[in-house]
Amino acid sequence: MTDIAGRNVLVTGGGSGLGRRMAHRMAKQGATLILWDINEPNLQKVTTELKDLTGRPAHGYRCDVSNRRDVYATADRVRAEVGP
């Protein structure tokens, strides 16, 4: 796996299941996490878990990846708020 420390990493479905597990693993490797999920309560829970785990903020965005407009709008927001 490529060294991801200090890099922005986007995880779709980051609010639960495999996405949550991957987010935890990547956060431990020093990545800046950007999580997309349709379930806002789970998303907020996981971003808090990641901050508690690493001391660094994780960025959570509600996004329905089955909706093209939502994906583009959320991507624009992430670029503006977090970076590429």
Image (cartoon, rainbow, N blue to C red):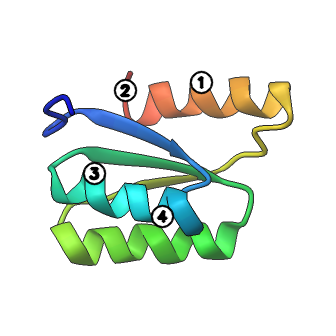
The percent coordinates of residue 32 (x first, y second) are: 27, 45
Q: SS of the residue at dot 3?
A: helix
The residue that mark 1 highlights is 76
- For the point 18% across and 28% down, the residue is 2
Q: Nearer the viewer, residue 77 or 51?
A: 51
Circle 3: residue type = Met
The percent coordinates of residue 65 (x first, y second) are: 75, 38
- For the point 71% across and 46% down, the residue is 63
The residue that mark 2 highlights is 83
Circle 4: residue type = Arg
Q: CA distance from mark 1 to mark 4?
A: 23 Å
Circle 1: residue type = Asp
The percent coordinates of residue 74 (x first, y second) are: 65, 34
Q: CA distance from mark 2 to mark 4?
A: 21 Å
Circle 2: residue type = Gly
Which image quarter holds the C terminus?
top left
User: How many numbered discs, if any?
Assistant: 4
**Is residue 42 positioned above or below 67 on the image?**
below
Mark nearer the N terminus (4 vs 3): 4
Locate residue 48: give its quadrant. Answer: bottom left
Q: CA distance from mark 1 to mark 2?
A: 9 Å
Q: Which mark is residue 26?
A: 3
**Is residue 83 positioned above or below 50 on the image?**
above
Mark nearer the N terminus (1 vs 4): 4
- For the point 72% across and 30% down, the residue is 71
Q: CA distance from mark 1 to mark 3?
A: 23 Å
Mark nearer the N terminus (3 vs 2): 3
Q: SS of the residue at dot 1?
A: helix
Q: CA distance from mark 4 to mark 3?
A: 10 Å
The residue that mark 4 highlights is 20
Q: Nearer the viewer, mark 3 or mark 2?
A: 3
Mark nearer the N terminus (2 vs 4): 4
